[in-house]
Image (cartoon, coloured by chain):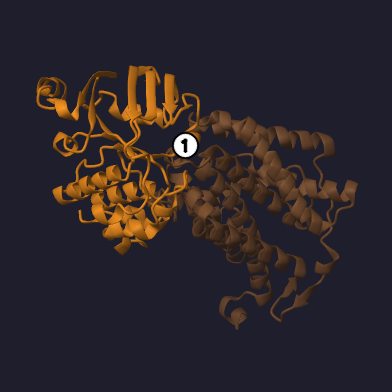
Amino acid sequence: MFSDLLGIAPQVLFGQLLLGLINGSFYAVLSLGLAVIFGLLNIVNFAHGALYMLGAFAAWLLGKYLHIDYWGALILAPLIVGFIGVLLDRFLLRRLAGVDHLYGLLLTFGLAMLIEGLFVKMFGASGQPFAAPKALNGGVNLGFMFLPYYRAWVVVASLVVCAVTWYVFERTKIGAYLRAGTENPKLLQAFGVNVPLLTTLAYGYGVALAAFAGVLAAPITQVNPLMGSNLIIVVFAVVVIGGMGSIMGAIVTGLSMGVVEGLTKVFWPEASSTIIFIVMAIVLVLRPAGLFGRTN
Amino acid sequence: MSGAGKHSAGIEIGGEHSSEKIEDLRITDLHAFYGESHALHGIDMTVYQGELVTLLGRNGAGRTTTLRAVMGLIGSRSGSIMLKGKEVIKASAHEIARLGVGYCPEERGIFASLSVEENLLLPPHVAPGGMSVEELYEIFPNLAERRTSPGMRLSGGEQQMLAMARILRTGATLLLLDEITEGLAPVIVDKLGDVLTMLKERGFTIVLVEQNFQFAAPLADRHFIMDHGHIVDCVLQSELQEKQAVFDEYLSV
């Protein structure tokens, strides 16, 4: 029926939809981390792509040297990279509190180049293969398309992480602290909340999300020192579309931009790599604060 | 407010007839800076437990800055601030709050993205014996009606009541209140006056920055007069009439 209507085979359409959903999952988890970080630190974390790559490398190194399997790495790598994030905030980013945004941008951008350069030097620019867990090998034929188990898992795991993060932000006490800290950190601290600690933990969590996405991506994209720098440009566009610092905006925009990109591949392949930037330009003209951003 | 008597059965802070006064706040030679500008030039003041004092003066005299300096919200300050016997000149804002201090900022500081109840429950307990949410809703019935509204939807009066209510929940016994009547309708100003009377009866220590002298005069035990970052005089409640000249000089525009 679809093929009659649109002149496109359903396998192609749904295949690209799934691909879009997977990319969208990565966009969502990464832009979610950026949103958390921007809210509390007021820093656009340009090191996010490098930390995503660190997550993938951490998983690969854990497997190679400590024989820790995928599932162990999926837990451990975000914890390790998140801890690195805590150290980065504690010893570098915290010193930039209260100065111009530009310094945070420069510092995190420099960090990204440093980390990526270091990994290219140590491991070369070519990718290291990383196997998906055995339990998720293969797939299922749904009739209109073939669904690989691992890709379905990536979408589900991302959605769960996004939903949990949203719930914590919107429905819990710590979430109320985080939202209040986004609005007026000084006053929150004057109520007795240890805001510097909260900020450090928020950065660690945002970074851990990036690392989590990195581990999820490892079996799909291979483990490559530059895997983050390619992706992160699109993720920044997603963040701008959704609205800086908006949790819901990051999740919804991330997923939908992945799907938009996938559909563009079907109907207008030439535009598929630029469509998100076109959307960004339009959103910036019509709603400069982003789709979910608050205009102050 | 009828509630003043009704609620006085609740918590009592401080000994009622203790002859020796306990210092809740002692500020010595406090200097504060906003970047290059020198905002406080050596403030000395002491506030005793259970007292209600005001900081009076023109705009820019340093009253808000004094409260912000006590709260640790000003980056650069020197001198000494003793809070309940502890030196806090180098402490962070959250450490200061945990000594039992409640701060109500001039701009009220209601969090726009949080609901009324979330705002009310936000500040952590800093000392035992804070008022319960039910009691606060009884004192401020308007807040009870609006408990699920987002903070950004509140009127100025509702915001002010919420800003007061949320620090009464935490168990703080020293309250720093900045311009709580500013821009509010007379009926709400009266309400806040009743609440302050009730808090005083319960033994709270209150430092009130106030523009509305008519509001502050009957409530306060002492008035500190500020001008250009100095405290120029301290007037007792009993001296109000004989010191009228001081008020005329430093408060008139």
Visual hue assigned to chain A: brown
Q: Is residue B64 left or right of residue A116?
A: left
Q: Secondary structure at mark 1?
A: loop
The structure residue drawn at horizontal position 66% and vertical position 40%, both measured from the top left corner, is A85
In depth, the one of A141 and B158 nearer the eye is: B158
Quarter occupied by residue B75: top left
Image quadrant holding the C terminus of chain B, namely top left
- Mark yes or no: residue B30 visible: no
Q: Within 10 angstroms of label 1, few (less than 14), some, or many (20 or more) residues?
A: some
The kind of residue on which mark 1 rests is: Leu
Point out residue A30 in the picture as x, y percentages from the top left corner. 62, 51
Compared to residue A180, the image places residue A12 above or below, namely: below
The structure residue drawn at horizontal position 33% and vertical position 53%, both measured from the top left corner, is B152
Q: Is residue A81 left or right of residue B7?
A: right
Q: What residue did someone put label 1 on?
A: B99
Quarter occupied by residue A21: bottom right
In depth, the one of A230 and B232 nearer the eye is: B232
In depth, the one of B75 and A70 nearer the eye is: B75
Visual hue assigned to chain B: orange
Point out residue A282 in the picture as x, y percentages from the top left corner. 44, 53
Point out residue A247 in the picture as x, y percentages from the top left corner. 52, 54
- Mark yes or no: residue B65 visible: yes
The structure residue drawn at horizontal position 30% and vertical position 64%, both measured from the top left corner, is B145
Point out residue A128 in the picture as x, y percentages from the top left corner. 84, 48
Q: Is residue B18 left or right of residue B247?
A: right
